[in-house]
Image (cartoon, helix red, strand yellow):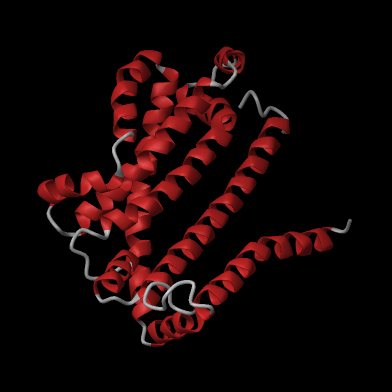
Amino acid sequence: MRPDRRAGGTLALSLLLPALVLVLWWLAVRLRWVEPYQLPPPRRVLTTLVTLAAGGDLARHIGATVARLLAGFALGALPGVVLGVAAGLVPALRRALDPTIQALRAIPSLAWVPLFLLWFGIGDRARILLIALGAFLPVYLNVVAGVENVDRKLVEVGRVHGLGPARLAWRVILPGALPSVLTGLRSGLSLAWMFVVAAELIASSEGLGFLLVDGQYTARPDQVVVSLLAFGLLGRLSDGILHGVERSLLRWRDALATSPGGGEG
């Protein structure tokens, strides 16, 4: 099968479920299975979407949410990678950190909101740090697992060839752990999107989380649905971008492994 035909078939399959959901949604409202004040008709949601977009409100709310997400993700992912590499290389450090990390994983995102309000106030600092916490945990855990699974024989070979800690990490440990690192980054980004909703409950005046809650308080389900759709589309888009980066980096790793002197530096 030709690649373009295969890609077209994949696209058609990926659109099948959204199309089915849209039809069922229209039928549910049309046949009064649900009341319009509970679930608005698709046309009303589209009208609200166009109105918010035309007035610039949608772009403003999306911009605020994306800015917080990127800042929080970077602030959580970077220490997650660094600390994950350190814990993966030093078993005693991993054992010391693991009970605390596992306990933090069990705490729901909304449970952090009151504490972060007390610690950091109602500004963006509290929101960004909450998102950073959500991003940190899966990144750290995946990086630890990836580093621990790197073939220790390769590490020893690198040391025999005189690679220092920095070059050893770049030439051996990072390429070996790269799939797990990238999986952790994608998981961290996904969890950051979940935490951003909780973060924007902290006295926000803009952002998709604010738009969602405002729709609830003003009994506008169409605005709530628009917010949910925006969250879903942005989450899918950001994951797609990171997936593209993942594929490029894995190709770099394979090229590094097969290049002359690639394992020796």
* Residue 31, image x, y percentages: 53, 78
Image: 38 above or below 148: below
Q: Position of residue 83 (x, y in %)?
A: 36, 30
Q: Is residue 176 left or right of residue 233?
A: right
Residue drawn at x 41%, y 47% as measured from the top left: 191
From this view, report whether residue 129 is shown above or below residue 91.
below
Q: Is residue 115 visible?
A: yes
Taking 42 as reference, is 74 above or below it? above
Question: How many marks on residues?
Answer: 0
User: Residue 48's image quarter?
Assistant: bottom left
Q: Is residue 110 left or right of residue 241?
A: left
Q: Dividing the image into 4 quarters, which one contains the N terminus?
A: bottom right
Residue 202 figure quarter:
bottom left
Quadrant of the frame with the C terminus: top right
Farthest residue toward the right? 1
Q: Residue at x 43, y 44 (%)?
A: 188
Q: Position of residue 123 (x, y in %)?
A: 17, 59
The foreground one among 165 and 108 is: 108
